[in-house]
Image (cartoon, grey):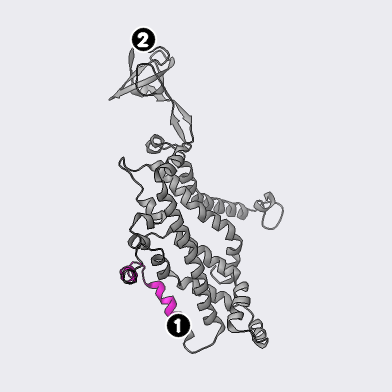
Amino acid sequence: MLSFFTRKRGGIRADWTDWLTYGYLGLGAIVMLAPVLWVVISSFKGEGNLTEFPPTLLPKSFESVKVPGYPRPLTLFRVTREDGSVVTLAQVRRVGIEAVMVDPAHPETGRITVPADRAEPIRQYHLATENYTQLLDSAGSRIGSSIYNTFFITVMATVITLVMNSMAAFALSIYRFPGSNVALLIILATLMIPATVVLVPIYLIVSELGLTNNPWGVILPVISTPTGVFLLRQYMLTLPTELIEAARMDHASEWRIYWKLVVPLSTPALAVVAIFSIMSRWNEFLLPLIILTEPHAQTLQIALAGYTDENGIHYGMLLAMTTLTALPLALAFIFLQRYITTGIASTGIK
């Protein structure tokens, strides 16, 4: 692994182009991964830690202590006196530029008023795992139904998309018939139509079919994608025609050629289309927002957008839910990543 990341162009000594390349790749990795790491780390921060400015990188919380005579724990501060000595006091309240403190070890000595700029809160590292536990406790069955709906829509839409796109690509790449290029151009032309333009017609059709608040109302309108058809067609054009002709000479049916020969050979391109489909279906927001209006039918993204209660938005639990919803996508990418480079290179999209 170390030798892979320290490979150099040409000789043993690193050239300036090697340093430039590694610097460019390192900067790209930081730009791509920093927001993801920030969300994951922030999901373990408390509410006070999330809203403070300037923000802290690591999850920290204010250390507090229970002082006799006070109903709630008081925040500890490190206070610098006029003579330069430093003492630890607990803050009762803050009034403008002054803070009212009490000695937690000797509360009977009474309250002390100190300038607020001489008091520094005492912090300690704390992983707010309660963001996850409270999320699961408060969401109850709602998050379970949202996870099931999202998984069902993603899996079924991806499977049907792969079948439909591969069959269309098989017809456009293997067969030679008049109008095949026109059909391909019409399919690719649909890429120029914004999704928001067809949103209302899709809703009207789904509503007439009685599929509102039904997962199939989200699955069926997008089972065929022009990008997937184009990728698979470009890959299937690279398959040797001798294999197809040999299968026909052995009296294989067209369905058998498609299912037993073309589909297995197109695995890298199918993996690329699968990862694109999984990412788009899992993160899809606009179409489920207008089709799935009932709480029991909503997906994770819709539930995530509406995750508030009577006390407002809990950013800690919101970030925890964001992290949980991103995990399946990361696992799918890790599982299919070995096919992605091969598939993209073979389909001509470089």
- Furthest residue to the top? 109
Q: Who is closer to the viewer here, 238 or 264?
A: 264
Residue lying at 31% horizontally and 71% vertically, measured from the top left: 208
Residue 16: horizontal and vertical position, in percent? 62, 53
Left or right of 17? Residue 211 is left
Q: Who is closer to the viewer here, 128 or 79?
A: 128
Residue to which mark 2 is pinned: 109
Membership of 192 in magenta stretch: yes
Left or right of 1? Residue 277 is left
Q: Who is closer to the viewer here, 50 or 142?
A: 142
Residue lying at 42% horizontally and 50% vertically, measured from the top left: 143
Q: Which amino acid does label 2 sit on?
A: Thr
Residue 114: horizontal and vertical position, in percent? 33, 18
Q: In which quarter of the image is the C terminus?
A: bottom right
Magenta-colored span: 184-206
Residue to which mark 1 is pinned: 183
Left or right of 328? Residue 19 is right
Residue 167: horizontal and vertical position, in percent? 52, 77
Residue 36: horizontal and vertical position, in percent? 48, 49
327 w.r.t. 219: above or below: above
- CA separation, marks 1 and 2? 88 Å
Q: What residue type is labelled 1?
A: Ala
